[in-house]
């Protein structure tokens, strides 16, 4: 049996509104009920635990859609136990409007508001004056720096016996401007001090007025206006009530209605009706007339008459169900059959024509154009010439045993470097092995080519690698700015030591072994 499960949710932040929180909680509740195999209903007690803000300390209960429907509630939220701050403020304002206000209290509150406005104005004035003070102090510092600099220039020119009258006049102008700025700074600092003192006094006076106003209690009595408004409201409510002598209550109407049968829920003695659900008759229903439509009930006599004119099921060919038919059958008209899908099925003329169509099959002889993709999984032999106009991809190994392979329009493309003596080479590989391979710095890699060129912009030692994998290789090394050759490192070896290299040098080399590359200066 399903139960009502309760859980709590504590809200610690006022970042979300109450409506947003209610929507999230309602989604949680509905998910809990959907996943509950026992069909339990859920309600959540929500508590706003923070102390400030519009919804501070508010609490209420959120119920599921099923709970609301089952209990006839008008909302998924049950009234909170505490008022929110806006609600409290509205109630206080409404009460204040209805109750008389003490003149002395109002006077003190109005005076406090005036002082608050005066304080705000003076604080804004302080901000402006502080900005002016910063500007003046920056100007003061600039003038002091100028006076100091011009004083040094005057002293230097006086020591050199030069005229300094113009510089002295300029210095005196700077000094006058500095005196003016300092006077303005002193005035502003005095004004700022006075404003801050005035604000302190005003704030103290305002606080005293607010305390005095709060100590004056508003009489808790209703004014005549409030009572008159309440009377009008009550009179209106009473006027809308129905007279009990001429009306029924809901309970009375329900009792009367329950004693009557619903015309839509019974079978009438006359008139046409549609009856739903299964009905069981304790005695057979009687029908004196034969049916004239297929949806009418037939009596026993009519059924017996019809059945006696029909052949038994096992001696006729049915329109449906599977049957085995014996004996020779002759059809005076064509027999219509669907397309056969199994080997034992009859086929129609359209299927025969499709199979016999020469344009839809590959003939063993004769010329044909074959469209579509064809996959030949076995060995394929072409005795005649093959003409291919499209792009061809050969994934396996292909061997051309006899005959000449000719490329009339374009050379074959090979992007793979040869790995064996019998492999073809592309133009880039042949060019690299026959021409000079540029070397950066002085490190020669024999795997990269045969002939090498170096351009030495600084003193460089020339080295060589991969001699072991290139034994027997010979080639040339061209060196631009040969004067920058500092040495030839092993396994490079001159039969006769060389020195005094010039601007351009050419050397021949032979790879004798992994530890000896014989080099000769040309």
Image: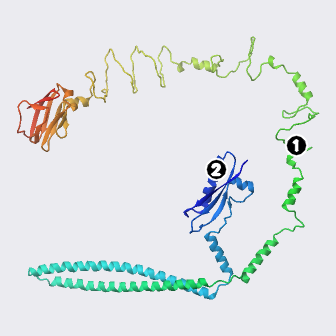
Instruction: Name which quarter of the figure residue 219 lies in.
Output: bottom right
User: Disc 1 designates what residue?
Assistant: 272
Looking at the image, the residue that sits furthest to the top is 328
Q: In the shown orientation, is residue 364 left or right of residue 71? A: left
Q: In the shown orientation, is residue 318 left or right of residue 257? A: left
Instruction: Name which quarter of the figure residue 331 lies in.
Output: top right
Residue 322 in percent (x, y) is at 73, 20
Q: CA distance from mark 1 to mark 2?
A: 48 Å
Measured along the vertical axis of the image, is residue 207 above or below residue 426? below
Q: In the shown orientation, is residue 8 left or right of residue 268? A: left
Q: Secondary structure at mark 1?
A: loop
* Residue 114 seen: no
Looking at the image, the residue that sits furthest to the bottom is 104
Q: Quadrant of the C terminus?
A: top left
Residue at 15 percent across and 78 percent down: it is 153
Measured along the vertical axis of the image, is residue 143 above or below residue 374? below
Measured along the vertical axis of the image, is residue 88 above or below residue 290? below
Residue 227 in percent (x, y) is at 75, 80
Residue 425 in percent (x, y) is at 26, 26
* Residue 256 seen: yes
Q: In the shown orientation, is residue 505 left or right of residue 175? A: left
User: Disc 2 designates what residue?
Assistant: 32
**Crowding at label 2, few (<14), some or many (≥20) Cα neighbours within 10 Å?**
some
**How many marks do you count on the picture?**
2
Q: Nearer the viewer, mark 1 or mark 2?
A: 2
Residue 367 or residue 58, whichever sits in front? 58
Q: Secondary structure at mark 2?
A: helix
């Amino acid at each position: 049996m399903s139960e009502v499960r309760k859980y709590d949710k504590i809200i610690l932040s006022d970042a979300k509104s109450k409506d947003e929180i209610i929507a999230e909680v309602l989604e949680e509740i509905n998910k809990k009920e959907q996943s509950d195999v026992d069909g339990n209903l859920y309600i959540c007690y929500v508590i706003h635990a923070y102390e400030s803000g519009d919804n501070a300390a508010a609490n209420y209960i959120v119920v599921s859609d099923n709970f609301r429907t089952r209990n006839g509630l008008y909302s998924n939220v049950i009234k909170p136990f505490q008022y929110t701050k806006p609600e409290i403020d509205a109630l206080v304002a409404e009460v204040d409007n209805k109750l008389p206000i003490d003149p002395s209290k109002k006077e003190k509150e109005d005076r406090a508001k005036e002082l608050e406005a005066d304080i705000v104005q003076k604080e804004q004035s302080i901000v402006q004056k502080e900005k002016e003070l910063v500007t003046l102090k920056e100007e003061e510092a600039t003038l002091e720096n100028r006076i100091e600099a011009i004083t040094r220039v005057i002293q230097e020119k006086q020591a050199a016996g030069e005229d300094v009258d113009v510089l002295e006049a300029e210095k005196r102008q700077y000094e006058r401007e500095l005196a003016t700025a300092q006077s303005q700074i002193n005035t502003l600092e005095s004004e700022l001090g006075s404003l801050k003192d005035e604000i302190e006094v005003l704030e103290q006076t305002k606080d005293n007025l607010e305390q005095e106003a709060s100590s004056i209690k508003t009489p808790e009595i209703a004014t005549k206006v409030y009572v008159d408004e309440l009377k009008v409201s009550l009179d209106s409510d009473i006027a809308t009530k129905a007279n009990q002598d001429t009306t029924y209550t809901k309970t009375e109407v329900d009792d009367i209605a329950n004693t009557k049968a619903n015309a839509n829920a019974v079978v009438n003695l006359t008139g046409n009706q549609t009856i739903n659900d299964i009905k069981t008759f304790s005695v057979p229903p009687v029908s004196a007339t034969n049916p004239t439509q297929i949806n009418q009930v037939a009596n026993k006599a009519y059924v017996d008459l019809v059945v006696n004119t029909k052949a038994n099921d096992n001696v006729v060919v049915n329109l449906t169900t599977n049957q085995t038919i014996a004996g020779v059958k002759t059809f005076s008209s064509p027999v219509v059959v669907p397309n056969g899908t199994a080997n034992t099925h009859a086929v129609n003329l359209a299927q025969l024509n499709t199979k016999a169509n020469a344009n839809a099959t590959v003939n063993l002889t004769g010329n044909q154009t074959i469209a579509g993709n064809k996959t030949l999984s076995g060995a394929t032999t072409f005795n005649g010439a093959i003409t291919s106009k499209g792009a061809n991809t050969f994934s396996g190994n292909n061997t051309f045993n006899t005959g000449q392979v000719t490329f009339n329009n374009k050379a074959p493309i090979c992007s793979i470097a040869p790995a064996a003596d019998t492999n073809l080479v592309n133009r880039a590989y042949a060019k690299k092995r026959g021409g000079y391979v540029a070397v950066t710095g002085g490190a020669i890699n024999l795997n990269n080519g045969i002939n090498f060129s170096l351009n030495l912009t600084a003193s460089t030692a020339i080295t060589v690698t991969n001699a072991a994998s290139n034994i027997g290789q010979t080639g040339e090394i061209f060196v631009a700015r040969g004067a920058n050759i500092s040495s030839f490192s092993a396994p490079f070896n001159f039969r006769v030591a060389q020195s005094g290299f010039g601007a351009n040098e050419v050397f021949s080399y032979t790879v004798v072994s992994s530890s000896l590359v014989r080099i000769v200066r040309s």
